[in-house]
Image (spheres, rainbow, N blue to C red):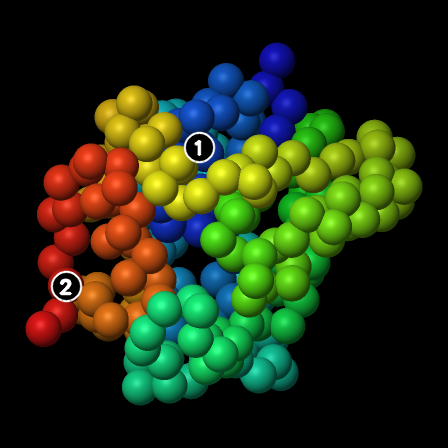
Amino acid sequence: MKNALLILSGGMDSVTMLYDYIDEIALAISFDYGSNHNDKEIPFAQYHCKKLGVLHLTIPLKFMRDNFTSSLFSGADAIPEGSYADTNMKSTVVPFRNGIMLSIAAGIAESRGLTKVMMANHFGDHDIYPDCRDNFVKYMSDAISAGTYAGITIDAPYTKISKAEIARRGKMLSIDYSQTWSCYKGESIHCGKCATCIERKAALSEAGIKDTTVYGA
């Protein structure tokens, strides 16, 4: 029985989870929260859901862009270049983004008779994004379970694995990663220089996947 709702951005990790856990996923939702790259990501989320016959919803959260501080809301030029180890990448944090999205997802899940919300955070997210860490997932799951009649829980099965390991799963599942988006700048092509692009390149390379992504100079 399909009992899960997946938060699906249209990036490599959540698209992999969609294919990896297709037997459990009844519904996928994307959040349009006003980031530079939402318009590039969400069509890929829709594409994969249509391909797999999974119901997809897009939930508007533009209030986040209007009220929160993050370089993800400030245009391509505001996105720093370099790896996630660089301290300037903290500018890409959207305060409590996952907490907000998981809360909404839990409400939708309970309204539709589902019992689990899935998210595709991974090990490489932890240092910079506090709402991707083990303890956050645990405590948020406990709170959502306590606050719903159905005892809805969060399932984050990629929390302790790397993006390269996720890509290896995708390779086994024959996922076409050219139909995903990573770049935080959200321009016509991937910039190739921001942390998400660098991480994408490394993961595909380590997984032995030919990278057909078009990157900027």
Q: CA distance from mark 2 to mark 1?
A: 25 Å
Which is in the foreground here, disc 2 or disc 1?
Answer: 2
Image-based side of 88 in relation to 143, left or right: left
For residue 68, say whether it is visible.
yes
| Secondary structure of residue under mark 1 | helix
Quadrant of residue 190 in the image? bottom left
Indicate the quadrant containing the N terminus: top left, top right, bottom left or bottom right.
top right
Residue type, mark 2 in image:
Tyr
Residue type, mark 1 in image:
Leu
| Secondary structure of residue under mark 2 | loop
Tag on residue 75?
none
Nearer-the-camera pick, 123 or 94? 123
For residue 184, say whether it is visible.
no
| Residue 109: percent from left, percent from top | 69, 37
Q: Identify which residue is drawn at 61% across, 80% down.
A: 68
Is tag 2's residue or tag 1's residue first in the polypeptide sequence? 1
Whether 91 is drawn above or below 152: the answer is below
| Residue 83: percent from left, percent from top | 36, 69
Whether 106 is drawn above or below 62: the answer is above
Image-based side of 101 in relation to 149, left or right: left
Whether 114 is drawn above or below 126: the answer is above
Residue that carries the numbered disc 2 in the rendered image = 215
| Residue 207: percent from left, percent from top | 26, 37
- How many C-alpha atoms fall within 10 Å of the one at disc 1: few (<14), some, or many (≥20)? many
Image-based side of 45 in relation to 137, left or right: left
Indicate the quadrant containing the C terminus: top left, top right, bottom left or bottom right.
bottom left
| Residue 7: percent from left, percent from top | 54, 45
Q: Are marks 2 and 1 in contact (CB under 8 Å)?
A: no
Q: Identify which residue is drawn at 44% across, 51% down.
A: 9
Residue that carries the numbered disc 1 in the rendered image = 18
Q: Identify which residue is drawn at 37% across, 50% down.
A: 11
